[in-house]
Amino acid sequence: MKLYYDFHIHSCLSPCGDEDSTPNNIVNMALIKGLNVIALSDHNTGKNCPAAMAVGKKNGLVVLPAMELTTSEDIHVLCLFERYEDLAKLEEHIQKTRLRIKNRPEIFGRQRILDENDEVVGEEEDLLIVSSGVSIEEVAALVGGFGGIAVPAHVDKQANSVIAVLGAFDYNLGFTLAECASEGVVDLPRIADSDAHYLWDISEAEHFIEADTCSAHGVFEALKKLCRAGKRKGVF
């Protein structure tokens, strides 16, 4: 079945995310846009994923747990998971490595953790939009070791992408899927997402993935199938 998706959406936990981007608002906007599945992918954290997943379950929208990890080189990598428990293990790992700089909400924005009723239950004190100690050379294997899929984010953008930072796409880094707005930028299967920081930027029902079931497991299996296609290209 065709499932329309957007796997790169930020909530109000990202300091650069709009405060209206709450779990309920994100899920409802995705439904209005005609999507079947989304991933909540805040910077270096997944702490708003449980709330978004709960809201999605109540409203018939599949929500994958995810994060947008910043490598030590300042490259963004989308980390997609089927289960929140596995994402939490990755977050625990990178919390030990990333820079500790106190957030200044008046400059960078608040970093709010919400429950499924959009009530504030906490706030991240350390700034999330900083580099971790995880290098681009190790991130694919690290995320895979926790059961996730590492996807170099917005590879066609001029900031925080593999190509922008390294000057070229290195296929020896072990990635089997890429996030890109256009075909032909890299020789890998691709997903196309919004990188939405505001509700209105969430994707319309344009890009889809073929899955056996409309479930987190079905979507994740479909993503793994795309990754296997990337491996068969023989570029590694």
Image: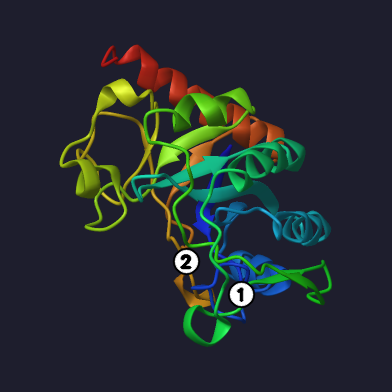
Numbered tag placed on residue 21 in the rendering: 1
Task: List x then y, in percent, for residue 85.
Answer: 76, 38
The residue tagged with tag 2: helix, strand or loop?
A: loop
Q: Are marks 2 and 1 in contact (CB under 8 Å)?
A: yes
Could you say which quadrant of the image residue 148 lies in?
top right
* Label 2 packing within 10 angstroms: few (<14), some (14-19), many (20+): many
Left/right placement of residue 122 relative to residue 166 reads right
Percent across and percent down for residue 215 are 71, 40
Q: CA distance from mark 2 to mark 1?
A: 9 Å
Residue drawn 69% across and 39% down?
Answer: 216
Quickly name the residue at label 2.
Answer: 196
The amino acid type, in three-letter code, at marker 2 is: Ala
Residue under the image location 69 percent in, 49 percent down: 62
Amino acid type at circle 1 is Ser
Q: In the visual, does 181 lie left or right of 33?
A: left
Q: Which mark is residue 199?
A: none
Q: Is residue 33 above or below residue 163?
A: below
* x, y percent for residue 156: 24, 50
Question: Up-down: is 86 above or below 180?
Answer: above
